[in-house]
Image (cartoon, coloured by chain):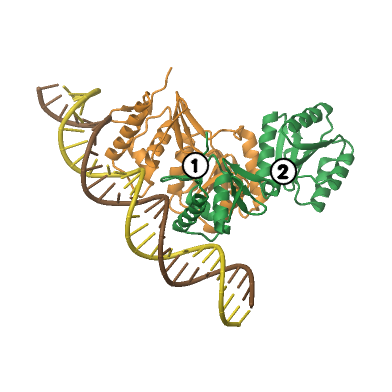
Chain colours: A orange, B green, C brown, D yellow
Amino acid sequence: MRILLIEDSDALRKSLTVGLHKLGYAIDSAATGTEGLNMALMGEYDILILDLMLPLLDGMEILKVIRKQNSEMRVLILSAKSEPEDKVSGILAGADDYLAKPFSFDELTVRLINLMRRGKLLYRNDEIVVNDFSLDLNSKVMRYKGMELELTPNEFKIIECIFINKARVITPERLSESIAGNYDSISKNAIEVHLSCVRRKVRELGGELPVKNKRGFGYIVTEDS
Amino acid sequence: MRILLIEDSDALRKSLTVGLHKLGYAIDSAATGTEGLNMALMGEYDILILDLMLPLLDGMEILKVIRKQNSEMRVLILSAKSEPEDKVSGILAGADDYLAKPFSFDELTVRLINLMRRGKLLYRNDEIVVNDFSLDLNSKVMRYKGMELELTPNEFKIIECIFINKARVITPERLSESIAGNYDSISKNAIEVHLSCVRRKVRELGGELPVKNKRGFGYIVTEDS
DNA sequence: TTTTCTCTTCAGACAAACTTAAGAATTTAA
DNA sequence: TTAAATTCTTAAGTTTGTCTGAAGAGAAAA
């Protein structure tokens, strides 16, 4: 069960992270909306705990973007406002549950457990499979027909992003973001080099990386049929 | 690991008892609430699997009494789906986890394993074994082929965290947390120094620490195959 | 064919991780 | 409380592995 927490208050973010981690959840956190959105779009989270009041990029905006991309992620809204209009619009925008601050840790865990029950998400394995390839997100290992491939961090992130978004074309800009984050960036050429390197590693095992380039657009998985 | 099961359905009680026994757990069971409560209060159980819907003495009542007596026992609630939502939420405050009927045996075992990991339960009797190495969590002793290694507290915590998470890559940040706690932290370099020190100690006994660094990711156990 | 985009290779720049050593800080003993 | 011992952290040097820009080859569009 992978959880992403987007919360700008340092104190709350830290205490929730520690608490949920102790309960055995794999939890990542982001302090800003932009960073959080990026992480969320990488797509590997089951549940998103989202503070509505964020500086710069509003929680509601994040929610909208996410809902367009990934309909599987459960979203739990945190908000300091307790006005009912907020609640309504939040849930309308695609959130699954709502929790008004201040709340106790127990209240939060109850909501989380309910969210998990709802979606049969609990036993989703941390693995992405494409044809003969699999990405183990825990051990950061890529496998081809069971054989292990050693990928560097950037190579892994690129493949991860492309694999997660199986059906979509991923632009180099998006890949750059997913590697470097919002404020730094990586050249298109660098991405090409990384991909080339992964392709070579796969070839050495007698396979072919199921990623093709759509000229002018970006990269997409080629699925066996 | 001692488990107590309180469940009035004969079929379910028997099948769970047999199944869990086969997995190596010491499991006792009770068919009624009163009998179950007595056993829970008398015996020393680590985990209680408690059906909410019991004739005569309700599961919720049992939980309340137990929570006053023994705060260490982990409680896993079983409940029919027809239970009102609020009742479930209410009882979750005192329970550690919740499983809605019908459930598969696999689902149950996953919950149990999570319960054991949680808190200090894992540390009670157990030791962690990796290849020729073992960590005795009670005496804080590391052994290599039976030979004792003296580790300092921080060294032990680092190895413990890495060993517990056998299959995952553990980031230095995570290690730092597990050493220093929530709000303090430890430099990456400090961790490297500790690890280096442990490696040296192991080398002096003619072995090699089964921990490798995945550059850019973190540390992970290397298992013999 | 020409143009444009993408792939690959390679080497230098760069960064992460390891080790050693020494000074702080903490714990234990007196 | 001070003194001694242990443990922790910082710092610096070394090793190792990764990243990226450049440039030419290759492929697709115009």
Q: Residue B89 carries which label?
A: 2
**Can you identify the residue that label 1 sits on?**
A63
Give left or right: position of B29 versus B20: right
Amino acid on which disc 1 is placed: Leu
Give left or right: position of B57 versus B142: right
Q: Nearer the viewer, residue B31 or C30?
A: C30
Give left or right: position of A196 versus A74: left
Q: Which of B101 and A55 is in front in this view?
A: B101
Amino acid on which disc 2 is placed: Ser
Q: Where is residue A224 in the image (x, y as percent from the top left)?
A: 42, 19
Is residue A83 in view from this perspective?
A: no
Q: Quadrant of the N terminus of chain B?
A: top right
Q: Mark 1 lies on which chain?
A: A
Q: Nearer the viewer, residue A216 or B65?
A: B65
Q: Mark 2 lies on which chain?
A: B
Q: Position of residue D6 (x, y in %)?
A: 56, 65
Q: Quadrant of residue A90?
A: top right
Q: How far apart are marks 2 and 1 (CA)?
A: 26 Å
Q: Which of marks 2 and 1 is in front?
A: 2
Q: Where is residue B25 in the image (x, y as percent from the top left)?
A: 74, 37
Q: What element carries label 2?
A: helix
